[in-house]
Image: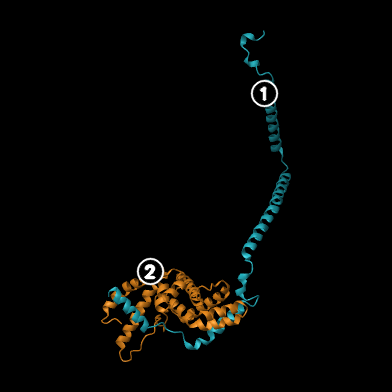
Amino acid sequence: MDDDSEIIDAILEGASDRYGELVDRYQLAAWKLAYSFVGNFEDAKDLSQNGFVKAYQNLGRFRGGSRFSTWLYRIIANECKDFLRRKNRRPFFVSLSAPDEPEEGASPAIPFELEDRGNNPRETAQDRELAAQLAGAMERLPMKQRTAFLLRHVNGLSLEETSEAMGCRLGTVKSHLFRASESLRAFLGPFLTSQETPR
Amino acid sequence: MNRPDWQVWLNRWLKRHPLREPPAHTRGEYVDQVMARIRGESTQDQPAVFRFLEPRPSLAWGGALAAGLAVVLLVSAPQRNLRRLDRDSQLLLAAGDFSFLEEDLEQELQEQETEDLVEEIEALDAVSPGDDLLPDEEIPV
């Protein structure tokens, strides 16, 4: 945080090129955060880069009381939410032929790393199915619960960081997380009970 | 699965299956692209980060715009009325028939005369108000 503050002070004094250091430092986390929302790397890259540009444009308003990273994550999360709202608002542009089928060759959007189980194709398929179910269940969560869950559990932020990034109190974050977890349990319960040994 | 088991299972699953990482070969250009966008968007003037220091233009511009609009409306309204009056009179002149105006004027004058007469009578009454209150027998024959 001290390093970030020092760079930010330098940028505000005119050394705008030093912003590259901040971009370099947080690019992976920012990209992954956007990816956890939108599920494809190209859009995630654009959205996270938009977030960096907006953060730069508003750097003067950044309050040193919070971390630059959580402030940036907040901007990116908002970018992603706007993107998803716009995307959900354009049903008229969806092709009328085979509307629910993914493009040929495209794999379903599973944002998680899957283990290669080598000679056990059944377990590999189970893993894949479970990851797809979880991804689908996360998409159905209300946006605030989804944001809290993605920041905390998928992107690994602490509770305090999640609270800062969402701009709400710790108790509210805990409440969102609890509800998200319960909703996921309800979504995945039937699927998990049908599995012999849930992993 | 009960709640505690579910929490344990979910945490363990997410640790074993972390979020996928973006392709490594595209990461190098990421910083350059952001910096290019920033330079492209802030070459016209000072770096954008300093813009907040300047007086906010929105209020001043809004006030100036409102004042300008008010001046335009104030100046244009009488002129617009004059233009309309002029146009109407030209139309009447072109039509050339004023008889309806004369009739109206005559009627108006007559009404005015009647009103004046009534007022005069009332004024006389005011000067000698008791005349019509005298008992019949006191009226000189």
Residue for badge 2: A175
Residue B136 as seen in the image, left or right of residue B116: left
Secondary structure under tag 2 reads helix
Quadrant for the C terminus of chain A, please. Answer: bottom left
Q: Is residue B134 above or below residue A158?
A: above
Q: Position of residue A37 (x, y in %)?
A: 44, 76
Q: Where is mark 1, residue-wise?
A: B122
When the figure is inspected, residue A102 is found, relative to residue B121, above or below; the finding is below
Chain A image colour: orange
Q: Dot 2, how many residues are within 10 Å of its Cα: few (below 14), some (14-19), or many (20+)?
A: some
Residue A95 visible from this viewpoint: no
Q: Color used for chain B?
A: cyan
Quick check: A121 above or below B42? below
Image quarter for residue B53? Answer: bottom right
Residue type of the residue flagged with mark 1: Glu
The residue nearer to you, when weighing B42 against A169, is: A169
Residue sitting nearer the eye, B66 or A92: B66
- Hey, which residue is sitting farthest front in the picture? A2
Q: Is residue A185 left or right of residue A29?
A: left
Q: Position of residue A190 (x, y in %)?
A: 28, 75
Q: Residue at x 32, y 76 (%)?
A: B7
Q: Nearer the viewer, mark 2 or mark 1?
A: 2
